[in-house]
Image (cartoon, grey):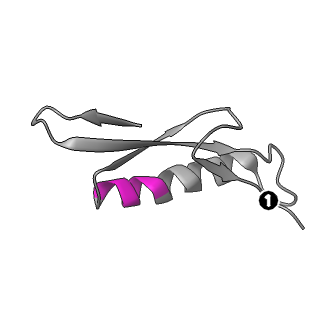
């Protein structure tokens, strides 16, 4: 996905989805917050924007397994 910012620069939007709702031994709220924090760092240093969605068709799917 893409869009233009106020200066007419191309911005890329990526959807991400935490697919494991209850990661074993991890608080899903903490996991979600850490994902947001990590992707915010990436976004600040690139022309990328990340949005969380609840959809298996997201660009980035995050799973936790044993």
Position of residue 15 in the picture relative to residue 9 (left or right)? right
Q: Is residue 56 magenta?
A: no
Position of residue 49 in the picture relative to residue 7 (left or right)? right
Position of residue 27 in the picture relative to residue 14 (left or right)? right
Q: Secondary structure at mark 1?
A: loop
The percent position of residue 21, horizontal first and vertical second, equals 80, 43
Position of residue 19 in the picture relative to residue 7 (left or right)? right
The percent position of residue 3, horizontal first and vertical second, equals 29, 33
Furthest-bottom residue in this view: 66
The percent position of residue 51, horizontal first and vertical second, equals 49, 38
Q: Quadrant of the C terminus?
A: bottom right
Magenta: main secondary structure: helix
Count of picture labels: 1
> Which residue is painted at 64% across and 42% down in the image?
17
Q: Quadrant of the N terminus?
A: top left
Q: Nearer the viewer, residue 9 or 34?
A: 9
Q: Is residue 43 magenta?
A: yes
Q: Nearer the viewer, residue 39 or 27?
A: 39
Furthest-left residue in this view: 7
> Which residue is painted at 76% across and 51% down in the image?
27
Q: Around disc 1, counting alpha carbons within 10 Å, would you say few (fewer than 14), some (14 to 19), or many (20 or more)?
A: few
Q: Which residue is mark 1?
A: 64
The percent position of residue 19, horizontal first and vertical second, equals 75, 45
Q: Nearer the viewer, residue 57 or 65?
A: 57
> Which residue is painted at 68% across and 33% down in the image?
55
Magenta residues? 39-44
> Which residue is painted at 29% across and 61% down in the image?
45
């Amino acid at each position: 996905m893409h869009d233009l910012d106020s200066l007419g620069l191309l911005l890329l939007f990526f959807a991400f989805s935490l697919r494991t709702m209850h990661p074993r031994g991890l608080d899903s709220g903490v996991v979600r917050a850490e994902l947001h924090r990590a992707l915010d760092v990436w976004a600040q240093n690139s022309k990328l924007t990340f949005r969380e969605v609840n959809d298996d068709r997201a660009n980035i799917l995050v799973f936790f397994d044993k």
